[in-house]
Image (cartoon, grey):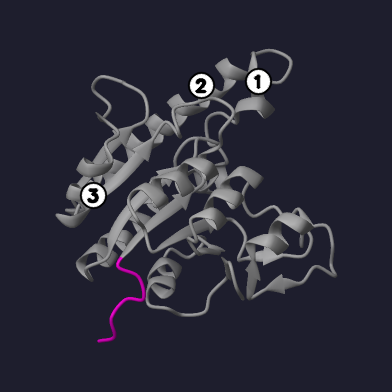
Amino acid sequence: MPEPAYKRVLIKISGEALAGEKKTGFDFDFIARVCETVKRCTEMGVQVGIVVGGGNFWRGVKDGAGHVERVSADRMGMLATAMNCLAVADVFKQTGAAASIQTAVDIQGVGERYSTAEAVRRLENGEVVLFGCGTGCPFFSTDTAAVLRAAEINADAILLAKNIDGVYSADPKTDASAVKFDSITYDEVLARHLAVMDTTATSLAMDNDIPVIVFALAEPENIVRVLMGEKLGTRVSKNK
């Protein structure tokens, strides 16, 4: 059997993906499929860290606009990611996989306070580590948190699991002429203002030379396909 293309990865999963067709809350059947797939990856020897968004409960500025001050809105989003981590960790445990939670802020009973050394130790022991509460600071997205954690744990790649199958020249839902890229550079993403990640996250990935693979999570098996080096979705890196 061929070896995985990556030894250690950071998977970013949107909160909306956890909700499935319901758009809010949890689709536990789908979450179970994702967890079973990630468990297979760990059994292949791949070390997996996960950052989960909170959009299935709260979308910060968008949901709080005009009613909740920005800092408070962002902290509410951090709490939403903590709830998601608890749910996903429990589903992992039901599959028989070892999973632990680290949070960027102290929340007693939810998880440990984030520690790079402890995260790496757990990854090397075969645990899936879920990173909650973003960066712990307002004004930074969970995309930025994903790149930050990837850099800190020295991940080989960031797997950006989305509701779309790659990076397009425009929104394919509204522009029939939109073209999907097989590969694209960070510079091009920033110059074209493409909605891959926010600009802070993209710049941080570029500065740390961490490739980002954008692919659709609708079929969780895609995670394994990407890890095995299959050309799927769009690869964002310094050079095409």
Q: Position of residue 239 (x, y in %)?
A: 60, 73
Amino acid tagged 1: Gly
Q: Quadrant of the N terminus?
A: bottom left
Q: Magenta stretch: residue 6 in it?
A: yes
Which residue is label 3 attached to?
Answer: 120
Main SS of residues in magenta? loop
Q: Quadrant of the C terminus?
A: bottom right
Amino acid tagged 2: Met
Which residue is label 2 attached to?
Answer: 76
Instruction: Give the CA distance from mark 3 to mark 2.
Output: 28 Å
Q: Are marks 1 and 2 in contact (CB under 8 Å)?
A: yes
Give the image quarter of residue 88: top left
Q: Nearer the viewer, mark 1 or mark 3?
A: 3
For residue 153, side relative to residue 12 (left or right): left
Up/down of 29 relative to 84, above or below: below
| Stretch in magenta | 1-7
Give the image quarter of residue 136: top left
Q: Position of residue 65 (x, y in %)?
A: 71, 20
Residue at x 32% of width, y 43% of height: 130
Which residue is label 1 attached to?
Answer: 64
Give the image quarter of residue 154: bottom left
Secondary element under disc 3, as helix, strand or loop, is: helix
> Could you tell which of marks 1 and 2 lies nearer the N-terminus?
1
Q: Residues within 10 Å of mark 1 (few under 14, many from 20)?
A: some
Up/down of 165 relative to 126, above or below: below
Up/down of 207 relative to 222, above or below: above
> For the view shown, which residue lies furthest in the front direction?
207
Q: Position of residue 203 (x, y in %)?
A: 60, 50
> For the view shown, which residue lies furthest in the left direction?
125
